[in-house]
Image: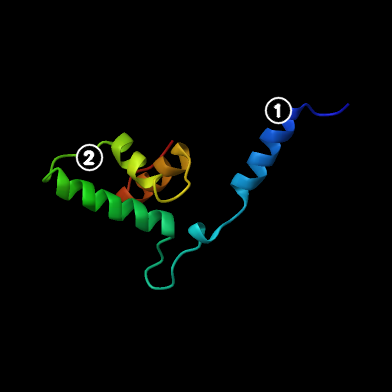
Amino acid sequence: MMASHTERCHRSRVRKARRPSLDDIPDVRDGLSRVERVILHELHKAETEFEGRRVSTALLYGRVVEHVNVDPREFQEILARLGGRQTS
């Protein structure tokens, strides 16, 4: 039985999403990946703009995806790891 067009497209996206990229490789200088570095940089910019007030995760995610392709779940995991929190 042949897979439908939707199933083939989904499989293709899943394969592409799992393919490691240069964004995932830690930098030799500090061990941060490009995605982690962008998250920290955008968090710092947002905290500066909001003068010490808390920055919402949604706002930070919106700023990060302007620079790197990261899905919300992966973003949450990286953010929790950088902040020292455990994800369930």
**Quadrant of residue 55 within the rendered picture:** top left
* Amino acid under disc 2: Val
In percent of the image, x 42 and y 54: which residue is there? 35
Q: Relative to residue 75, is residue 40 drawn left or right?
A: left
| Whether residue 59 is situated above or below residue 42 in the rendered picture | above
Between marks 2 and 1 in the image, the one whose residue lies nearer the viewer: 1
The percent position of residue 30, horizontal first and vertical second, equals 37, 69
**Residue at point 43%, 72% (across, down):** 28
**Residue on which disc 1 sits:** 6
Q: Which part of the image, by quadrant, shows the N terminus? A: top right
Q: Residue at x 16, y 50 (%)?
A: 48
Residue for badge 2: 55
Amino acid type, label 1: Thr
Q: Is residue 12 left or right of residue 2?
A: left
Label located before the other in sequence (2 or 1): 1
- Give x and y (percent) for residue 70: 47, 45
Instruction: Name the foreground residue: 32 vs 11.
Output: 11
Q: Can you name the residue that lies furthest to the left here? A: 51
Q: Is residue 66 above or below residue 35?
A: above
* Disc 1: CA contacts within 10 A as few (<14), some (14-19) or many (>=20): few
